[in-house]
Image (cartoon, coloured by chain):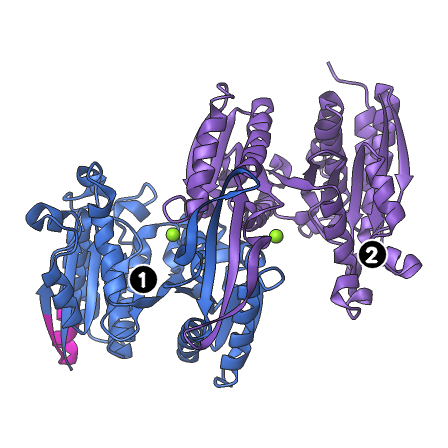
Chain colours: A blue, B purple
């Protein structure tokens, strides 16, 4: 397979962890006989420093001409004082918009070897393997009006939760398709006992479900889901929900894993290249120290192979390698829990060794 | 002090646990020389059975003529088949509306003796003592329009998040006043990086804070708060937020305690009697078996004394008694974790004994 991957390393630890992920992808290409071309583009603070804007046009063109995008992280104290619309984070928002990414995928898996670093007890989190699918283009964060008004002679304010049926259908179909490749269960989260938008959401979910007879659909209220993620996180296979609920629940769920340094994400584009990036930020405090955990970026690369290129065997290979080095006891400092830790480079190295190792019988 | 307390026992275990709470209040009245009159009213399924509606007018009148309301729980399978607007739960919604309750208080405390029954590790939850203050009359659950519309030739839907400045100010003042009596810290939760309503919320919070110089205000985004409740729940003293965010976060936080059977709540009225009730429901599966945990109802009675009557010493007495019987090892079955458990009546009895015990030197 021949593919072009845009690499936007961004700022801070974004550079280090993305470099590790690219090296892993090169090893995969080699081993499975693919040709991956890596094209580098500027985004975030570095783009501001070099070109005055957080997302130069040539980066947009690059992304639109690529098959998938591997992103690091953007931002840092250095750029905190510049006007809001020119900040590094705007680069992220803009590239998401340019590519019309409508679905945010946040897998939460808890590796047995790391189950003890969760705030939750091992028996609650060991074996958790859940995919949160969040709608990303609609809902309360984008609806209009969103403005100050006057009411009864005083200041008031309004925000609007708006969805078109087609937007709801699109994200639900993504969730059902994902469930087909996983454990065949979709939990659709809403607030249908109160919100009209949730009642439409639930209707559409029931309709879409008819096209996926091998998938089991259940509905859950958002407050119940917030409880269930703690009481019994193993309950979930694919959890799909609208933008705001997904924002809250995916961040809540991320805590199950103990460290953000383990969590990858994908943002699926409706018609172009999708974006893959770690959940963690640019962590300027440890940038350039060869200390960052590259696993989230490496697992993002695995998601890229799986969701953009349908290379499941290759994705499995990376995920298995990560699991095996953790089982062997390798830890970066964020997950070391006081024990000895290894550098970013060393972690990448042992993961690559695990990928290259002959398969055991 | 001479007070009238309306008692709406409701359905299922509501009856048993409320009876226990009333007995505790009688003992408190006796010991501290108060006169509490208990007037009983119908609500929920029982009201439907006896009078055909979930909230008879005489119950409304009773509540409006009382100084505070002690509520059990409503609902049960028996009434699930009747039309929605006549269901037991409508009785709850209606009484809240009649009394214009605008603030829902959900304290989350984790007793040392019970810290091991949380899904979280003991070191994360032991000593948690947080008060969640949720706005209850506005926001996305009540804004208009909330309806189907047509857009771009297809079905679409809109819900509206609406707040008047005065509604925001009222709930924030409640939170600051509460913090003054607690540990002097308010965490105001919003989504000010995206929502205009949150930006007004944050402005009002800053203004209100000027009137409470002894209280420290911090702002936190709702997704960050969903994480922080797991990563470091001891961070919080008073957490105040709008209706929807509060719905999700208070339910998430309730999981820290291990069992809903421990959690009381209050719904403060703007001008009449406030309502005190356990967070748990009517639990028809164990109703009438003398098995239900009465502690949530008893702690609700303590909240009633504290927030409606300003009887802090009396409230402390109840809370200390609960803590002491738990430390002695008394457990109802929901918190027994496989160990021996006691009945509802026995739990009430030992709590009353603890209240009546001479104070140790
Ligand atoms: Mg978030
Ligand atoms: Mg709720």
Q: Is residue A280 visible?
A: yes
Chain bearing tag 2 is B
Q: Residue under circle 2? A: B54
Q: In this view, does A37 lie above or below B7?
A: below
Residue at 86 percent of width and 31 percent of height: B4
Please tell me how crowded label 1 is: few (under 14), some (14-19), or many (20+) other residues with Cα within 10 Å.
Answer: many
- As helix, strand or loop, the secondary structure at mark 2 comes to loop
Q: Residue under circle 1? A: A265
Q: In this view, does A182 lie above or below B278?
A: below
Q: Distance between the residues labelled 1 and 2?
A: 48 Å
Question: In the image, A283: left or right of A118?
Answer: left
Question: In the image, B312: left or right of B348?
Answer: left
Residue at 13 percent of width and 67 percent of height: A61
Identify the mark at residue B245; answer none if there is no mark.
none
- As helix, strand or loop, the secondary structure at mark 1 comes to strand
- Residue range highlighted in magenta: A26-37
Which residue occupies the foreground of this view, B209 or A13?
Answer: B209
Q: Is residue A56 magenta?
A: no
Nearer mark to the viewer, of 1 and 2:
2
Which residue occupies the foreground of this view, A103 or B348?
Answer: A103
């Amino acid at each position: 397979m021949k593919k072009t991957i845009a690499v936007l390393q961004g700022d801070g630890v974004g550079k280090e962890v993305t470099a590790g992920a690219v090296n892993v992808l090169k090893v995969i290409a080699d081993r499975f006989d693919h040709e991956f071309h890596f094209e580098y583009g500027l985004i975030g603070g570095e783009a501001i420093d070099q070109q005055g804007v957080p997302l130069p046009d040539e980066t947009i063109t690059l992304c639109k001409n690529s098959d998938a995008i591997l992103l690091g992280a953007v931002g840092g104290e250095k750029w905190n004082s510049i006007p809001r619309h020119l900040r590094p984070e705007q680069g992220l928002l803009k590239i998401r918009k340019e590519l019309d990414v409508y679905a945010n995928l946040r897998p939460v898996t808890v590796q047995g070897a790391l189950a003890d670093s969760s705030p939750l007890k091992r028996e609650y989190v060991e074996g958790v393997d859940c995919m949160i699918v969040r709608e990303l283009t609609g809902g309360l964060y984008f609806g209009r009006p969103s403005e100050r008004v006057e009411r009864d002679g005083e200041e008031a304010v309004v925000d609007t939760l708006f969805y078109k049926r087609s937007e709801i259908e699109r994200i639900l179909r993504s969730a059902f398709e994902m469930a087909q490749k996983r454990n065949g269960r979709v939990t659709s989260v809403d607030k249908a006992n109160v919100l009209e938008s949730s009642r439409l959401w639930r209707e559409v979910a029931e309709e879409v479900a008819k096209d996926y007879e091998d998938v089991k659909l259940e509905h859950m209220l958002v407050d119940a889901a917030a409880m269930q993620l703690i009481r019994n996180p193993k309950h979930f296979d694919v959890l799909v929900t609208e933008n705001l609920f997904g924002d809250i629940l995916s961040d809540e769920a991320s805590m199950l894993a103990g460290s953000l340094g383990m969590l990858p994400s994908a943002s699926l584009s409706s018609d172009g290249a999708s974006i893959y990036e770690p959940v963690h930020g640019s962590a300027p405090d440890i940038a350039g120290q060869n200390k960052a955990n590259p696993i989230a970026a490496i697992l993002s690369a695995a998601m890229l192979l799986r969701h953009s290129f349908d290379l499941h065997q290759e994705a499995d290979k990376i995920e298995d390698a990560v699991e095996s080095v953790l089982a062997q006891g390798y830890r970066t400092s964020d997950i070391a829990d006081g024990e000895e830790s290894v550098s970013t480079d060393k972690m990448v190295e042992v993961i690559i060794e695990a990928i290259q190792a002959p398969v055991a019988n």
